[in-house]
Amino acid sequence: MKKVLLLFLSLTSCLGIYAQGTLESTGTLEVSISASLQPGAESNDEGWFTIALKAPDEDKLYTAYQMDIFLPAGVVFNTSIDKVCDIYFEECPIYPYTTSGRGGTKSWPHSLTYNIKSDNHVQLLVKSDGNDAFKRNEGDLFDVYVQATPYAKPGDFQVTIKDIKFVSPDETKYLYQDQVLTAGTISPETSVLVRVTAANKFSTAIFPFSCAVPEGLEVYSTDGSDAEYISLTKQESITAFTPYILYSENGVDVTLDGTIDAVSYPAGTFVSDGCITGVLVDTQVSAGYVMQNKGSGPMFYMIGSTPFTIPAGKCYAEPTPANAPALNFRFENDETGIQSVSGSNNQKHSTIYDLQGNRVLTPQSGHIYVINGQKVIKR
């Protein structure tokens, strides 16, 4: 990877060096083939769109170009295949070639090099060692391979292309205006993976659609927090774009299917209920609390000096005035009055039962038990 990056930087430097003059271009780019993306947790969709050159300056035949491509939230480069950007030379007659042998084997002098800066930003460069001119002044340039995440907003999506530079045979550099192009559509049908381990029993989630709560899972919304606790209320169904805390006594691993409503889709990439925040894209957070299990069962622990990346579809707790090192759970509106405590003298002398009514002599951390008629999370 380091060698590829160094090669890319070297080629980019060369492109800038041999371009003697610089002119503003009136040319444009366009999407000649649009992508059709199917989001979802189990989607193996190999969507792509094709960038083409249109209306260059004074019918110039270029020799090289470079640009930066930015994808919208919810669309990422498909790094599961060999190349996220590629040229199918047989289908791109804009590029020159030579033939050899009796069969007339074609060989193209141009090559494409790219550098992935993030999930939705790539820099690319196309040039030839011999400064060979293109055969045409318009046509397809390259393909970009992308995927839609389970939380992508349905409908048309646009890409932004910046720092566009083309070079002509007389070594003049042409600077194009930044361009925003509609690159394809995203289906509203999607699926999300819900996984809560039997060891941790707790997790967080935000769902892009409304649906029923699957068997073996309990879903809780938050009712605020105080110095030590986040108050939770059990919900009988899942509402789209609502941050939740999940609980499963024996663990659950299930894929939920649904349809995203573009009209109710949030304006940004996160949703907050004032206590916890669910994110729709991977989000780096430097303040607040993240759910972790440090040996005493899952709790929200304060983020330290190193920022924490919250995966898409998960939640984090927002900072509190008390600045407590950790936040526990307090369950409200439960018929047995669930509470979350670390243990007390009264509990030590009380009979303990599991949720099936069996007596428990040695309670385990992170499990819910019934003590004195109340549900208690053992810490």
Image (tube, rainbow, N blue to C red):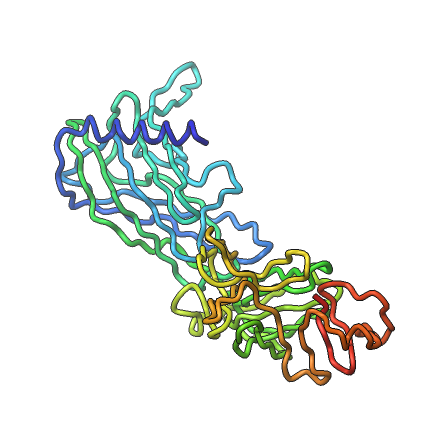
How many numbered marks are there? Answer: 0
Quadrant of the image containing the C terminus:
bottom right
- Measuring from the top left, give residue 253's x and y in whole percent: 69, 60
Residue 211 x, y percent position in the rendering: 60, 73
Q: Is residue 376 above or below residue 22?
A: below
Rendered position, 57 above or below 265: above
Q: Quadrant of residue 100?
A: top left
Q: Nearer the viewer, residue 147 or 110?
A: 147
Snapshot quadrant of residue 134: top left
Name which quarter of the figure residue 332 lies in.
bottom right
Left or right, 330 with respect to 78, comes to right
Farthest residue toward the front?
Answer: 345
- Residue occupying image coordinates x 48% and y 74%: 273
Between 190 and 12, which is closer to the camera in this rendering? 12
Residue found 72% across the figure and 62% down from its top: 251
Give residue 138's position: percent from left, percent from top.
25, 40
Left or right of residue 60, residue 275 in this image: right
Please tell me which residue is depicted at 83% across the width and 65% down the height of the picture. 362
Q: Nearer the viewer, residue 273 or 77?
A: 273
Q: Name the residue at 63% across, 73% down.
A: 219
Q: Is residue 307 above or below residue 144?
A: below
Q: Where is residue 315 drawn, in percent x and y?
A: 53, 64
